[in-house]
Image (tube, rainbow, N blue to C red):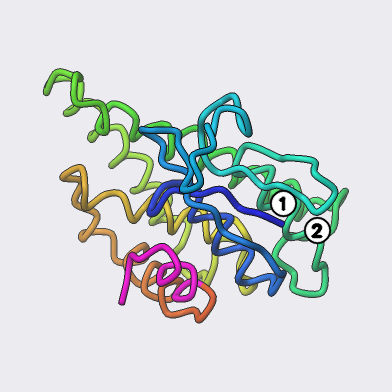
Amino acid sequence: MKLYYSPGSCSLSPHIALHEAGLAFQSVFAPTKTKKLADGTDYLTINPKGQVPLLELDNGERLSEGPVIVQYIADQVPDKQLAPPAGTMARYRLMEWLNFITSELHKGYAPLFNPAMPEEARALARARLMEKFHWVDGELAGRTWLMGDTFTVADGYLFTTASWAKYVNLDLSGFAHLQAYLARVAARPAVQAALKSEGLVK
């Protein structure tokens, strides 16, 4: 498999999932600004959306959209329990988390990463994100991971989106449950491996 990624972006989530799964894969840097790969290939010929992540399977099929990709990865190694079995209520709870993270947190950062956005709009975006993270902090009380005692692909995605806070003047330090949780995620060997692979830690 090939994972097309950009360091520190949302593609860090499937990067973590692949390391947690222990699957063989090749990571390919796909600059989101230039859309040019190291060998000169136009990334848009591979993914017309021009976004990361993109997972290319061994049979040549390609999957886009992070929440879909991480579930595919998890389903390749059911024994790792990165996602509950399909059709179970627990699986729908995982999908609930993935959808919340992608729609309320991930997309909530968009105004903050847009240099053309007026400061008034940025302030509103920060306030909305703080409300969402406040709710997440409460949900993490008494839990080791989002789904309880088992680390899942949703944890890698939440860790990824929370890591962007420092770049956009979003102060999450007051959320004690969230901070302890993020430290637990960061300490996982697979997470460290993904971070090192993207040059985010030494």
> Where residue 19 sits: x, y (%)?
60, 70
Image position of 124 (left or right of 179): left
**Does the magenta segment cover residue 165?**
no
Image position of 78 (left or right of 9): right
Q: Which residue matches tag 2? A: 75
Quarter of the N terminus within the rendering: bottom right
Amino acid marked by disc 1: Gln
Quarter of the C terminus within the rendering: bottom left
Q: How many marks?
A: 2
> Callout 1: few (<14), some (14-19), or many (20+) C-alpha neighbours within 10 Å?
many
Quadrant of residue 154 within the rendered picture: bottom right
Image position of 62 (left or right of 136): right
Above or below 122: residue 141: below
> Callout 2: few (<14), some (14-19), or many (20+) C-alpha neighbours within 10 Å?
some
Residue placed most toward the observer, 55 or 145: 55
> Where residue 96 sits: x, y (%)?
64, 43
Residue visible at 36% across and 53% down in the picture: 162
Residue visible at 56% across and 58% down in the picture: 27
Residue visible at 28% across and 42% down in the picture: 130
Q: Which residue matches tag 1? A: 71
Above or below 155: residue 123: above
Amino acid marked by disc 2: Asp
> Where residue 134 sits: x, y (%)?
34, 48
> Where residue 129 sits: x, y (%)?
32, 38
Above or below 80: residue 75: above
For the residue labelled by badge 2, is the local secondary structure a helix, a strand or a loop? helix
Residue visible at 32% across and 72% down in the picture: 201
Magenta segment range? 191-202
Q: Residue 163 carries which label?
A: none
For the residue labelled by badge 1, is the local secondary structure a helix, a strand or a loop? helix
Query: Are discs 2 and 1 less than 8 Å apart at CB?
Result: yes
Image position of 162 (left or right of 165): right
